[in-house]
Amino acid sequence: MDQNNVKTLAIKPLTQLLFKPPSPFTAGIFGPAAIGTTLSYPYPSTISGLLASILYFQQYDTTTTSYECEDYRDVKELLEYTIIRPGFLKISDKEDYNIYLNRDVFPKTTTLVEKIKQVIKKEQNGVNGKTLEDIHKEITSLTETANGAILAHRSRISGVALNRSSKSVKTGYLYQLERIEYEPWNTQLTIYTKNLKLPDKKYYVKLGGKQGTAILEIQRTDKEMSPFIYYQEQNTMRWLGILISPALIRINEQSLQTLKEQLKYDTFIPNSKKLSKALGKLLLNETKPDIEASVIYVPKGESSLGIVNPGWCTARNIPREPYLLIPSGTVLEIDGLDRKRVEDLAWQGLGASGKLGWGTTILIEI
């Protein structure tokens, strides 16, 4: 990896923020009961869209140029060879990173890795059903306690819809919106990037819904991939992968329906081997036939496994094409991955549109 191409983005919120999930308001309800919820960490489409918009205004004369492409191509063409790896937070005066595991409690990466290694070390026979269940318990416990964690606090504001043609209030169209702020106050969202063609400087940016604002600071980094990859003393070629940003899978309708029906009943699926391997293969995009992966745990939280439209296509003024979303906090077991290729996989991400930030994964050698 050429470290000269690696930059970190530090997003420092100036206001409360709203990160809408890919879902509408409460269906069929008006008045104060209609609630727009917020995620505690933005989807990758929000971050890639932010960077693409900065590049757009730097590269194009918006008064004379019409730049519209189908679906994700507008963002992809602007970002070109850029790779985005979100999912991290940190306190601005600290070195430790915290990670997003689909809840509003963000544990320290080092704490999570150490607890998982301790669980695996207890089992003399290697990774088995009991080991995986203990790992599941450790992850859940870390996302339920504030010990050493960064927190996202929610608050609600009330609003009323407007009739744009008459410039008056729509009778009865009240609603509430959630917004978040982080504790400690000097928390920043941290994103790793590679080949980002933006200068190292600070930007004042709009972020998320309702015109939230933040400072975006871009700077080069000399750090290695330590927030992503954690090695054992010996090369085992076996890894646990933990998603810290959601992953997307583009599959046919029949497979999608089967996966949805099988997974909706339980969050822990150690006995569904065929299904687990099918998901793992789809997440690897079938580009590495000598590597096997199985999804062993799908968490409950802010997002859930299901069909989503990840963002809006402004060119066609419709939602983007649907995908199967695998939420952050999902755990995979990966076999056959040697150390020479682990860094490539960490940068590539899992699933579709990995370069745009989807499928960022912490990899722990076991």
Image (tube, helix red, strand yellow):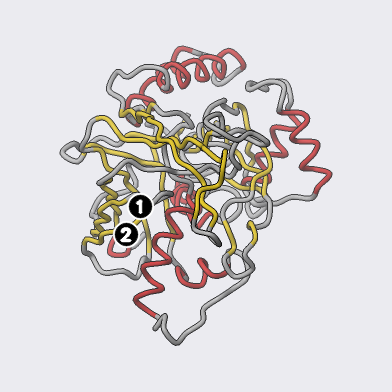
User: Which residue is rendered at x = 41% and y = 73% of the image?
Assistant: 56
The residue wearing badge 2 is 6
The disc placed on residue 192 is: 1
User: Which residue is rendered at x = 48% and y = 19% of the image?
Assistant: 140
Label 1: few (<14), some (14–19) or many (≥20) C-alpha neighbours in 10 Å: many
Q: Secondary structure at mark 1?
A: strand
Q: Secondary structure at mark 2?
A: strand
Could you say where residue 228 lies in the image, as x and y percent from the top left? 39, 42
User: Which residue is rendered at x = 42% and y = 80% of the image?
Assistant: 62
Could you say where residue 225 lies in the image, as x and y percent from the top left? 34, 47
Say which quarter of the image contains residue 64: bottom left
- In the image, residue 115 above or below residue 88: above
Label 2: few (<14), some (14–19) or many (≥20) C-alpha neighbours in 10 Å: some
Circles 1 and 2, Cβ within 8 Å, touching? The answer is yes
Q: Could you tell which of marks 1 and 2 lies nearer the N-terminus?
A: 2
Could you say where residue 100 lies in the image, as x and y percent from the top left? 42, 35
